[in-house]
């Protein structure tokens, strides 16, 4: 074979070898770059891109859906406010820390539950990973309007490191009884103005029954609202007597048995009916 022809073939073979080597190096580089991302990450990126593209194409159409969702949320919020009596009047939020997987925000909430005002401050820690998002509340601080509610104050003090759910559930139950007591006292004060007096007003925890016919004879209906460590609320009522020595000598048996009979009536007929019977009997005493 002609030496010139052989040289041409050799040059072409050498050129092909170099091209093959270059392609092999490029393939190896591309393989190394792809190892930085797992199959799961690549799939998630593709899905994320698809959602973004879908959102861009449907952005104008979803505006009505967002409005409907907002109205639905407002309806649910209104229902919860009526159900629990809790209304929020202000909310302040401040981001304290934000990283790829961690967010810390400080919240301040103000509101009222029936006639009880409250203010909350807490930090919300959100942690995010590939599987889910977790949240935790820290540095909880609860401030209530001072009204001398000793049991509620003790519960709030013990709940400073507790849960918001427990606080709101207990506050709602306590406020319901608190409002029920206020309305009951108002009812009897308006119905029997000559007998019923409210030394501490409607927000106090007792009423006095003063006999219009017998001086030196008073009964005190005490209505406490007990809240235990678990946040359970219970109304606790009792009857105390205040009588002069002369009246005590005349009605010893009746006065001594009055508290026990009142407690029995509470179990049999309930709070309102028991007080009603007590006032009726007390007003007819001679």
Image (tube, rainbow, N blue to C red):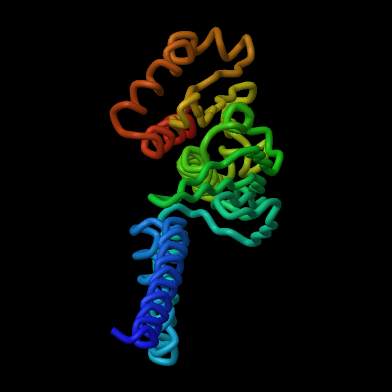
Image height check: is 214 above or below 138? above
Q: Compare residues 201 and 59 and report the one nearer the observer.
A: 59
Residue 181 placed where, x, y %? Answer: 51, 41
Residue 28 placed where, x, y %? Answer: 42, 62
Image height check: is 203 above or below 66? above
Q: Compare residues 3 and 278 and report the one nearer the observer.
A: 3
Which of the 4 quarters of the picture holds residue 153?
Answer: top right
Looking at the image, residue 198 sits to the left or right of residue 135; the answer is right
Residue 237 placed where, x, y %? Answer: 47, 26
Image height check: is 2 above or below 96? below
The quadrant of the rendering that contains the N terminus is: bottom left
Q: Is residue 188 visible?
A: no
Q: Residue at x 34, y 59 (%)?
A: 39
Looking at the image, residue 222 sits to the left or right of residue 94; the answer is left
Which of the 4 quarters of the picture holds residue 91?
Answer: bottom right
Q: Is residue 63 visible?
A: yes
Q: Residue at x 56, y 38 (%)?
A: 195
Q: Residue at x 66, y 39 (%)?
A: 141
Residue 118 placed where, x, y %? Answer: 64, 47
Q: Compare residues 120 and 16 and report the one nearer the observer.
A: 16
Q: Compare residues 55 and 113 and report the one nearer the observer.
A: 55
Q: Residue at x 34, y 65 (%)?
A: 43
How many circles with numbers are drawn on the protein? 0
């Amino acid at each position: 074979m002609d030496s010139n022809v052989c040289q041409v073939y050799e040059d072409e073979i050498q050129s092909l070898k170099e091209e093959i080597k270059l392609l092999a190096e490029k393939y190896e580089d591309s393989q190394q770059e792809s190892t930085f991302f797992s199959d799961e990450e690549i799939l998630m990126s593709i899905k994320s891109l698809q959602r973004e593209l879908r959102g861009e194409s449907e952005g104008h159409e979803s505006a009505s859906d967002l409005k409907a969702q907002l109205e639905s949320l407002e309806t649910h919020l209104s229902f919860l406010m009526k159900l629990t009596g809790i209304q929020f009047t202000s909310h302040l939020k401040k981001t304290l820390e934000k990283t790829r997987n961690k967010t810390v925000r400080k919240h301040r909430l103000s509101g009222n539950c029936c006639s009880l005002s409250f203010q909350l401050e807490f930090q919300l820690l959100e942690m995010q990973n590939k599987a889910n998002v977790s949240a935790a509340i820290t540095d909880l601080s609860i401030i209530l309007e001072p009204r001398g509610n000793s049991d509620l104050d003790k519960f709030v003090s013990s709940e400073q490191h507790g849960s918001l759910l427990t606080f709101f559930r207990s506050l709602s139950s306590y406020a319901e009884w608190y409002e029920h007591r206020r309305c009951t006292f108002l009812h009897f004060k308006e119905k029997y103005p000559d007998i019923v007096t409210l030394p501490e007003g409607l927000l106090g925890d007792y009423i006095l029954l003063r006999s219009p016919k017998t001086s030196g004879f008073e009964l005190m209906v005490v209505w406490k609202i007990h809240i235990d460590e678990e946040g359970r609320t219970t109304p606790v009522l009792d009857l105390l007597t205040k009588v002069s020595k002369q009246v005590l000598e005349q009605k010893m048996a009746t006065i001594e048995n009055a508290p026990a009979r009142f407690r029995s009536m509470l179990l049999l007929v309930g709070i309102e009916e028991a007080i009603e019977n007590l006032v009726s009997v007390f007003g007819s005493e001679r």
